[in-house]
Amino acid sequence: MKRGVHVLSTQYLVLSTWYLNFSFAAVAASIGCAPTNSSPANAEPNFSAQATAVREGRADRIHSESTLLTDQDLAEAAGLAALRELLVDHPESRITSAGVKHLAGVPALEHLRLRGKGFDDAALAEAAKIESLQILNVPQADLTDVGLTELKRLPKLVQLRFGSPRVTDAGMKTLAELPSLKQLHLIDVPITDAGLAELAKIERLESLYIDGGTISDGAWEKLFRERPKLHVHVNQEHHDRDPHKHPH
């Protein structure tokens, strides 16, 4: 009898481990942070080769995960009429306004993700020229309240994720004025109760993720009274009042 219990326990452990690994991989892939496969057989094409594929109509996205890129590399993307997604995931890649400037003439670009540093107010001013942009993800940005006003030039922006210790509650007033914003993720942005009150004014907002900030329980209670259906994460966890709360 003990042997049977041991076998079942072992099988359960193996199955559980597989499930956890599978779940982690699925979630990681969905947010673009899946671990890089370093096997030569799965090496990603270089940026130039991916740009050529888009130029020839064989692709509509460029995803650079394991290659460190610079502003000069983004020159390859200039004028790519079919480019819909540009994802630069190497954390040490430094793309500044000089690199983003090359994307101003890319008419179909909807999704721009730059995980490295270098994205400041000047870079945002260049990104704001991409009127087709719907998703902007710059987790290590260095933006200011004044710089955020450039976002008003993006009429189709639905999803915004950024980090910056220099943005304050005043910047939340700007975000509340964006015409299409539905998903917002703030990373180490030092907002307070006043900033949260501004975000509560975004009637179309469907999800709000805040990592950092100083917000009181009373401010959260007020938010959920005003926006009872809003999906909220705080510091990587569902808020207790989140109506969409589920196990992670």
Image (cartoon, grey):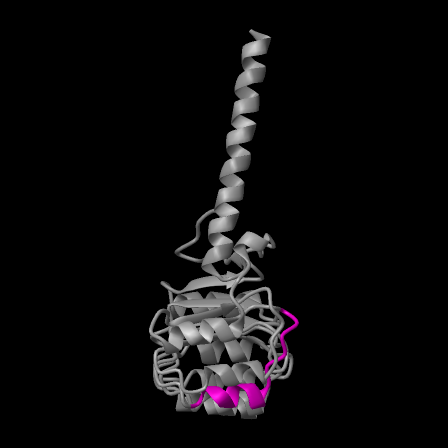
Percent across and percent down for residue 121 are 57, 90
Instruction: Specify the segment rendered in magenta.
Output: 91-104
Q: Is residue 27 above or below residue 165?
A: above
Quarter of the figure with residue 192 = bottom right
**Is 209 included in the stretch rendered in magenta?**
no
Q: Is residue 197 above or below residue 16?
A: below
The front one of 207 and 242 is 207
Residue found at x 51% / y 55%? 28
Quarter of the figure with residue 117 = bottom right
Residue found at x 56% / y 83%? 169
The front one of 100 and 215 is 100
Q: Is residue 239 left or right of residue 132?
A: right
**Tag count:** 0
Percent across and percent down for residue 33 are 54, 60
The front one of 178 and 227 is 178
Residue found at x 37% / y 64%? 228
Q: Is residue 117 above or below residue 37?
A: below
Percent across and percent down for residue 245 are 44, 53
Residue found at x 54% / y 91%? 147
Percent across and percent down for residue 128 are 45, 89
**Is 94 included in the stretch rendered in magenta?**
yes
Q: Is residue 169 above or below residue 237?
A: below
